[in-house]
Amino acid sequence: MSVYANATAQPYPSAQSIPALLARQISSPVLFQEQIETMYADGARIFIELGPGAALSQLVGQCLAERDHLAISFDGKIKDPVWRLWSGLGQLSAAGLKLDLKALWEQTALTPPSQESSSAATVGISGANFGKRYPRRDNDRKARPSDPRRVEAPLAANEPTPQNQSAGEVSASRDPFAGKDPTNRTLP
């Protein structure tokens, strides 16, 4: 990978020339557009800004206009540096770069999920219901102890009560899909 000098808009010619060229850059105008054009002509298509803000990434966009390129700032207006890092890496990955992120996780110990008690409103997401028919019919339900937190919906005024109906009739009266094609699950 070449390193470009902004005083010459060219790659550093040799390691020995770096000190003199760096000293010259302090008092020379910055040839930013020329440097970006030279880098693009040399095959650079991805430009990453690591300094504060996103001004240089925006300037790269202006210099290259409609030409194929990607300019990413790892800073910007988001204050959380970890979020900025992951956002920049995500943009690079979305652009198709193969990233080796193992080093970011080497010092991270995986801990099991918390065993704290959850509220009654917590719903576990485990995939246990995948492929099961929903809504379940009354005769599909397995016997289980009654849950004191469960509240049955009140019956409508004209709906028959369980005392004067058989179990099948009660199930059919509460199930909007009873007697219908099981593949058609739209509410009437």
Image (cartoon, helix red, strand yellow):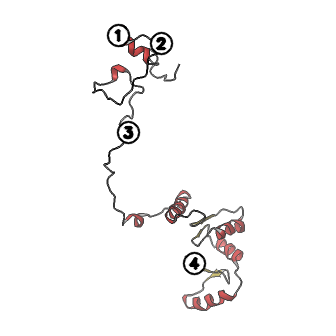
Q: At numbered mark 3, what does the secondary structure look like: helix, strand or loop?
A: loop
**Which badge, 2 or 4, comes first in the chain's sequence?**
4
Give the residue pinned by disc 3.
127
Give the residue pinned by disc 2.
157
Res 31 → quadrant: bottom right
**Which badge, 4 or 1, comes first in the chain's sequence?**
4
182 or 74, which is in the foreground?
Answer: 74
Q: Nearer the viewer, mark 2 or mark 4?
A: 2
Using the image, determine if residue 98 lies above or below residue 2.
Answer: above
- The label number, if any, that marks residue 163 in the structure image: 1
> What residue is rendered at 51% in x and 64% in y?
85
Which quadrant of the figure contains the N terminus?
Answer: bottom right
Residue 23 % position (x, y) = 62, 90
**Which badge, 1 or 2, comes first in the chain's sequence?**
2
Q: Nearer the viewer, mark 1 or mark 3?
A: 1
> What residue is rendered at 71% in x and 76% in y?
34
Q: At numbered mark 1, what does the secondary structure look like: helix, strand or loop?
A: helix
Res 5 → quadrant: bottom right
Residue 168 % position (x, y) = 36, 12
* Left or right of 62, for residue 171: left
How many residues crowd mark 3 within 10 Å: few (<14), some (14–19), many (20+)? Answer: few
Give the residue pinned by disc 4.
2
